[in-house]
Amino acid sequence: MKRIGFIGLGIMGKPMAKNLLKAGYSLTVTSRTQKDVDLVVAAGAEAGASPKDVAAKSDVIITMLPNSPQVKEVVLGPGGVVAGAKPGAIVVDMSSIAPLASQEIARELEKKGVRMLDAPVSGGEPKAIEGTLSVMVGGAQADFDECLPVLKAMAASVVRVGDVGAGNVTKLANQIVVALNIAAMSEALVLAAKAGVNPDLVYQAIRGGLAGSTVLDAKAPLVMDGKFTPGFKINLHAKDLYNVLETSHELNVALPMTAQVMEVMQALKADGLGDADHGALIKYWEKLAKVEARR
């Protein structure tokens, strides 16, 4: 069985690493927060001294980091993965970053004989804990096939969507759909509340029809209970939409609705809500309408 390295034990990375341990993999981990490392070590992992050290002890090195600069630093920087990885090893970047950054990192790794998949995930913390994430993967078919059992230890759905970079293009598409779904839900529930109709009854009435969605079922109950503890922070979703818009500008693709939701997120960040769950998008419309959509 392959030896796995895992770098980045945040909200998502920690449960993902634990699911690899449950599947029986030998795991070496490191993260910038020592208490997160300690929690995963307590579950059976070995602590690595650095990304270089983790890579040296692993056949597959998984990274789960905030954005492109952090992935570049951890993989290509001093004491990084590239300095420790053996030829033939595979880096599986499960972060959500810019597709062009994934391709740049892959080219640098290739010079050292190290392979790469970009494999961002969807599902948030609950599905990370359950091991039922959706993973969208870019990379060579043979590398995908080799890593599929590892990915399936953390996910319910693992789909190869093309070469390196395609995984993150797919994740950007996913983040557009999720953001616009939450925005639409927010407008609908705030309208209902302002009209004096119980938003929970509106939710129950529409969820089984065409307006129903996984996003609606995941977020509406939390929003109506006023629960905004992050499963996925506004700061991180805004980061993803920044990468969406950067990529769309490079491709001359107009995304006006995505841009508008990005501006809503900026307003909420200015209100101090950047670390709240992205369901807190509703607070923008609640503030405008001077009403709370609670049950």
Image (spheres, grey):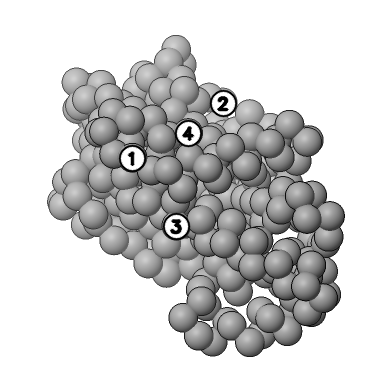
Residue type at mark 4 is Tyr
Residue furthest top in the image: 78
Give the residue at x 50% y 25%. Answer: 70
> Is label 2 in contact with label 4 (beta carbons under 8 Å)?
no
Q: CA distance from mark 2 to mark 1?
A: 45 Å
Q: CA distance from mark 3 to mark 1?
A: 15 Å
Q: Position of residue 16 (x, y in %)?
A: 53, 54
Q: Examine the rendering and report whether any part of residue 230 can be seen.
A: no
Residue of label 4: 242
Pointer 4: residues within 10 angstroms few (<14), some, or many (20+)?
some
Q: Quadrant of the N terminus?
A: bottom left
Residue with the mark numbered 2:
49
Q: Nearer the viewer, mark 3 or mark 1?
A: 1
Instruction: Inspect the image, locate mark 1, and give the three-letter code of the amino acid beneath it.
Output: Ala
Q: Amino acid at mark 3?
A: Val
Q: Which residue in the protein does label 1 denote?
A: 254
Instruction: Say which label, 3 or 1, has the lower sequence index.
Output: 3
Q: Is residue 66 visible?
A: yes
Mark closer to the observer (1, 4): 1
Q: Where does label 3 land, which residue?
A: 177
x, y (%) of residue 44?
A: 60, 52
Q: Provide the secondary structure element on which disc 4 rests.
A: helix
